Amino acid sequence: MIFDSIVVGPLEVNCLVLACEETRKGIVIDPGDNVGGIIDLVAKLNIVVVEIVATHGHFDHIGRVKSLQEEWGVPFTIHRADLFMVEGLVEIASFLGIQTDEPPTVDRFIEEGDTLSFGNETLDIVHTPGHAPGNVTFLWPGHAIVGDVIFAGSIGRTDLEGSDPDTLMRSIREKVMALPDDTRLYPGHGPFTTVGQERETNPFLR
């Protein structure tokens, strides 16, 4: 698996690029900003993007989807529960003084139990709501892209529209912390971590 990342936007989102080594087909996850940087990274990796995917619908994760859809002519995928955030993208971001693209077209809705495939690679999809109603986690052996559910030493905010603290903790304990301790976690912001490290040191899980 080809795996790389770039930090984008004023809220420093981890935009991730994954691709199949054999076919060079790949996906971009959470392109919130810095279109040029993302395009350059994809070119450096010498891959062909076949899908743009969001872990959830907050503006800092989807702000530049439309620009990249137009650049690559590829579909955009998200959980249906976060469609209201996609539709309200410009209004929500402008309230905080941040510019984004116009709302992108959603071509596919994903649910728990679905998969993402690119080339010879497949990611399993687990619904992990709480921070956002449509937050999803993407899994492959030993790895989990978790969006804003859990961070190194912290957890996702629950003071936003559609968030819920009890739901978030249930997602963390039943879905994320149920993974093996050596599973690498790739949050939407901040450093990467592991299940074991968070189990031992994350104060919100004690």
Image (spheres, rainbow, N blue to C red):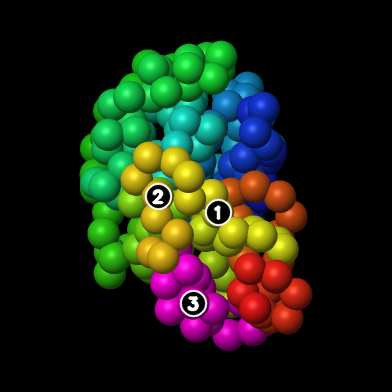
Q: Could you say where residue 84 lies in the image, as x and y percent from the top left? A: 27, 34
Q: Which residue is mark 1?
A: 156
Disc 2 from disc 1: Cα separation: 9 Å
The magenta span reads 168-183
Q: Which residue is mark 3?
A: 173
Q: Is residue 26 visible?
A: no
Towards the viewer: 204 or 178: 204
Query: Contact (CB < 8 A) between labels 2 and 1?
Result: yes
Disc assigned to residue 74: none
Q: Which residue is mark 2?
A: 163
Classed neighbour count for the residue bearing mark 3: other residues with Cα under 10 Å, few (<14), some (14–19), many (≥20): few
Under mark 1, the amino acid is Gly
Disc 2 from disc 3: Cα separation: 17 Å
Point out the tag, 3 or 1, that comes first from the N-terminus. Answer: 1
Q: Could you say where residue 93 lies in the image, as x and y percent from the top left? A: 48, 21
Towards the viewer: 18 or 21: 18
Where is the C terminus found, in terms of image quarters?
bottom right
Where is the N terminus found, in terms of image quarters?
bottom right
Q: Is residue 83 left or right of residue 136?
A: left
Under mark 2, the amino acid is Ser
Residue drawn at x 71%, y 50% as measured from the top left:
190
Query: Contact (CB < 8 A) between labels 3 and 1?
Result: no
Under mark 3, the amino acid is Arg
Point out the tag, 2 or 3, that comes first from the N-terminus. Answer: 2
Q: Secondary structure at mark 3?
A: helix
